[in-house]
Image (cartoon, rainbow, N blue to C red):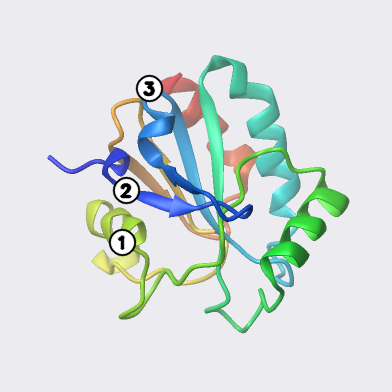
Amino acid sequence: MTSVYDYSATLADGTTASLSDYKGQVLLIVNTASKCGFTPQYEGLEKLHATHKDAGFAVLAFPCNQFGSQEPGSTEEIVEFCEMRFQTSFPLFEKIDVNGTNSHPLYKHLKSEVKGLLGTERIKWNFTKFLINRDGEVVGRFGSQKKPADIESEIMALL
């Protein structure tokens, strides 16, 4: 059975990270953007990450420019924005596509495991969140409207 641990992605610093590096942790994988109405969710994501990282939890952020071109910057600009504005400490990956023919393989897996509204796989907007259990299984999908604090109880149940 395929799990998120079977995938790898490029971190913002240009190194490749295998998601197996996060084996045994609860993960929240999020497609992010710096110029979106939901961008303030970075604050909530950082709070979740900081509060629960010692218990085996991590937020993994994947910037994406597919929704209203709301992530136009370079990787360096995105990192600077996140660190300066929201003091993020969770892993930030290079910009990817989450929909379409160039969709990152990890996102193809996430979308096929837990469907969205009306059974669709397509990501609707920035800040869609996928919750992963300690076995690397996708156990939840939350749309942009769902704030990070609103899913803390689901995270804690997995920790």
Which label belongs to residue 105? 1
31 in relation to 123, above or below? above
Q: Quadrant of residue 3?
A: top left
User: Tag 3: residue type?
Assistant: Gly
Quadrant (top left/top right/bottom left/bottom right) for the N terminus: top left
Of callouts 1 and 3, the N-terminal one = 3
Number of residues whose C-alpha sits closer than 10 Å to that of mark 2, classed few (under 14), some (14–19) or many (20 or more): some
Number of residues whose C-alpha sits closer than 10 Å to that of mark 1, classed few (under 14), some (14–19) or many (20 or more): some
Of callouts 2 and 1, the N-terminal one = 2
User: Tag 2: residue type?
Assistant: Tyr
Question: How far separated are the C-alphas under marks 1 and 3?
Answer: 21 Å
Number of residues whose C-alpha sits closer than 10 Å to that of mark 3, classed few (under 14), some (14–19) or many (20 or more): some
Q: Which residue is mark 3?
A: 24
Question: How far separated are the C-alphas under marks 2 and 3?
Answer: 15 Å
Q: Which residue is mark 2?
A: 7
Where does the image place residue 87, in percent across and percent down from the top left? 82, 43
Q: Residue at x 39, y 42 (%)?
A: 18
Q: Quadrant of residue 105?
A: bottom left
Circles 2 and 1: CB atoms closer than 8 Å: yes
